[in-house]
Image (cartoon, rainbow, N blue to C red):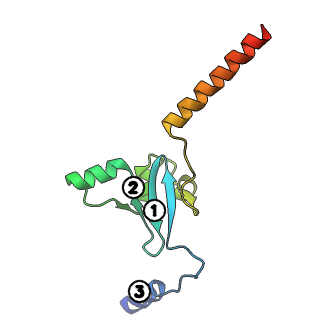
Amino acid sequence: MTEKWKVATATAAATAAVPAECPTSVAVDCGGAKGEFVVCEGLVHCACRGCAEAVTAGFQPTNVFGLQAFEFHGGKGSAGKWKASIKVFPDGYPPEETEAEAAAAIAEDEAEAAAAAAAAA
């Protein structure tokens, strides 16, 4: 393959039109590491606390990963299949229960169970 062909192919790929309905970025998660996949870059910008602290402290230069590197970062690298390991959330992350909400729900369930046991006795 000649250099001219390589340059022409890279230029054509870089200028390929992205469909209008394609989002510019999507939320992704891999093994608890949350990030944002930027479509035009093909890279994941990690939003985990560890990356933020490491970049701030200067331990790592950036929080941007390729898809396979993000899979390793999320602890799923042994699978070797980033297409299966990285979960995509096109509409944003699903709402998560906070620890306080979860504790309140557990306490409410225990109270209901205790009331049902008292009524049965």
Quarter of image, res 110: top right
Q: Observer-nearest residue: 7 or 106?
A: 106
- Kind of residue indicated by mark 1: Glu
- Kind of residue indicated by mark 2: Ala
Residue found at x 69% / y 19%: 113
Q: Observer-nearest residue: 25 or 65?
A: 25
Spot occupied by residue 33 in the image (x, y as percentages of width and height) = 44, 50
- Residue 36 numbered mark, or none: 1
Give the mark nearer the N terminus: 1 vs 2: 1
Locate the C terminus by quadrant: top right
Task: Find the distance from the CA under tag 1 to the CA under tag 3.
Answer: 30 Å
Q: Which residue is mark 2?
A: 47
Q: Are marks 1 and 2 in contact (CB under 8 Å)?
A: yes
Spot occupied by residue 78 in the image (x, y as percentages of width and height) = 48, 47
Numbered label tally: 3
| Mark 1 closeness class: few <14, some 14–19, many ≥20 residues within 10 Å | some
Give the mark nearer the N terminus: 2 vs 3: 3
- Residue 6 numbered mark, or none: 3
| Mark 2 closeness class: few <14, some 14–19, many ≥20 residues within 10 Å | some
